[in-house]
Image (cartoon, rainbow, N blue to C red):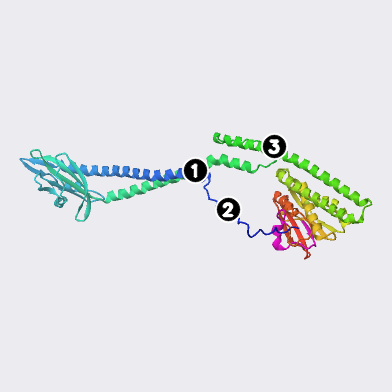
Amino acid sequence: MTSPSPSPDASAPAPAPAPERRSRLSLKQQLLLWLMVPVLVAVPVAGAVLYRVMHDTAISWLDQSLGDTALAVASLIHDRDGQIYVDVSGPTDSALRFDRTDSVYYLVLDPDGRVLHGDASLRGLKLPHRAAGEWYFTIATLNGESLRVAALGSACRFAQSCQILVAETLHKRDALQRQLLAVVSLLIGGMAVLLAAAGWWATHQGLRPLARLSAELERRDLGRLEPLAAEVPGELQPLIAAFNRLFERLRRASSAQQDFLANAAHQLRTPLTSLRTEIDLALLEPHDPQVEPLLKRLQKSVDRSARLAQQMLSIARAEAEPQQRESPLDLRDIAAQVAEDWVPRALETGMDLGFELSEAPVLGQGFLLRELLENLLHNSLNYAGPAARITVRTGARDDWAYLEVEDNGPGIAPQDRPLALQRFQRGSEAKATGSGLGLAIAVDIAQRHAGRLELLDATSGQGLRVRLSVPRRG
C-alpha cells in the first residue's frame, strides 16, 4: 500500500541541526519574579531597620532605668561642714541593688577619687572623670563579666563633682535582644509570605483575562471565526482587535478555499470522466487489435488519475472542514451505505466482500468517514488482488467504537507500517500501483475525530487488518 521513500544520496550535505530551544519563563513567572525580587530585597532591609529601632528604643529605656538609679544615689550625697558622706541605710542599699534578673553594683567617689560608698571594685573600670551633670554610658568588662555602666557627675563641695557609677549585668538585655530578634523575624517572615501570596494572587487575577482569551482561542477553528467579545482590560483591546481582523481574513480565505475546491472538483472530474468515456467507446468500436493494450493502459491511467484527484480533494476538504460540524452517527450505517456501491463492484471483480456489522455510535462527519472506508476498501482491492477476501467490521468495546477492514493479501511488514501511514509512502514489498495517499488520508480523518488508525495482523493469519478507533458516543 505504501513504500519507503528512497534513501538520500550519501554525498548530500547533512541537514543543519535544529536550533536549540531555550526554555523561557512564562508571563506569570516573570511577573512573580519582578514582584518577588524587590520583596526579597526590601523585606530584610525593613527587618533590619525595625530591629535596630526597637532594640535602640528598648536599650534606651533600660539605660534610663540605670540612670534613674544613678540619680537616686546622687540624691543621697550630702555635704556637712565640708565633709561629704552618702546617707545609705541597709534597706536603701537593698532597694538600689534590687533587680529580678541582673546583679546591680554602684560606687560613689569623691572629687579626689576616694571611695565614699559602694562597690570599690568598680574603680577598676577606670572611666573618664565627668563634670557635674554629665552622663556617660558604656559596656565594660570587670572580672570577666560584661556590665552596662552609667557614669554621672554630681555637684558636691565647692562646685566640684563626685563620680557616681552604676553597673548591672547584661542578662535581661541579652534576653531582650533574643526576643526582639524572634519577634522581628516572625513579623518579617510573615510579611514576606503575605506579600508573596498577595503577589501570586494579584498576578493570577491579573492574568485571568489572558487565560480566558487563550481558552476561547483554543476552541476556535475555521467553522467558528466570529469576532471575539471577551471582556478584557483596556491593554488587551488592541490584541482582541488584531485577532478579529485575523479571523476576518481567515474567513475570507476559507470561503475562497471552499470555492476553489468546488471548482477544482468539477474541473478535474469532468475531463477525466470524458476521457474515460472516450476510451470505453474506443474499446467498443472496431479497432486494430494492436491498439487494444494501449487503450487498456490508458484506461487504467485515467482511473488512477481520477482516484488521485479524488484523494487530493479529500485531503483538502478534510483540512478545510471544521470539526464543529460533527453529528451523531453510527459506523454501522456508514459501512452499509458504502456497501451499496461496493457490492456490485465486488461481484464484477470476483472479490469476496463480507460485512460483520454491529452498533458503533460516534460523533463525526459522515462524508469523511465514508471517504476513509472507501480508501481502505480501495487499498485492499488494489493490493490484495481482484479475488481478495475482504471483511468489514464495526462494533464497540468499552469507550471506543471501531471500524475494521481486513483482507487476505500480502499485508505490510511490521517495520514498514509506521512509514506506510505517511503521505506518498508505500510498503517496501508493494507490487501494485498506487499514490500512497489512501492510508495517510485515513490517518488525517481519524485524528480529526479524536481517534487513531492502526495497522494490525489479520485475524486469519495472512493479510492486513486496518482498524479505526473513535471515542464512543454515550
Report the amino acid beneath label 1: Leu
Q: Is residue 472 visible?
A: no
Instruction: Tell me: residue 264, above or below residue 420.
Output: above
Measured in 3D between alpha carbons, the distance from the residue under mark 1 to the one under mark 2, in whole angstroms, is 30 Å
Q: Is residue 238 visible?
A: yes
Residue 260: image location, x then y, percent: 75, 40
Measured in 3D between alpha carbons, the distance from the residue under mark 2 to the one under mark 3, in whole angstroms, is 34 Å
Instruction: Tell me: residue 426, above or below residue 86.
Output: below
Image quadrant where residue 68 sits: top left
Instruction: Tell me: residue 340, above or below residue 53.
Output: below
Q: Are marks 1 and 3 in contact (CB under 8 Å)?
A: no
Q: Nearer the viewer, mark 1 or mark 2?
A: 2
The residue identified by callout 2 is 18
Image quadrant where residue 262 sits: top right
Magenta-colored span = 404-425
Q: Nearer the viewer, residue 323 or 191?
A: 323
Report the amino acid beneath label 2: Ala
Q: Is residue 39 left or right of residue 367?
A: left
The residue identified by callout 1 is 31
Most extreme residue toward the left is: 81
Instruction: Tell me: residue 244, above or below residue 299.
Output: above
Q: Quadrant of the N terminus?
A: bottom right
The residue identified by callout 3 is 252
User: Would you say residue 306 sits in the magenta stretch?
Assistant: no
Residue 89: image location, x then y, percent: 14, 46
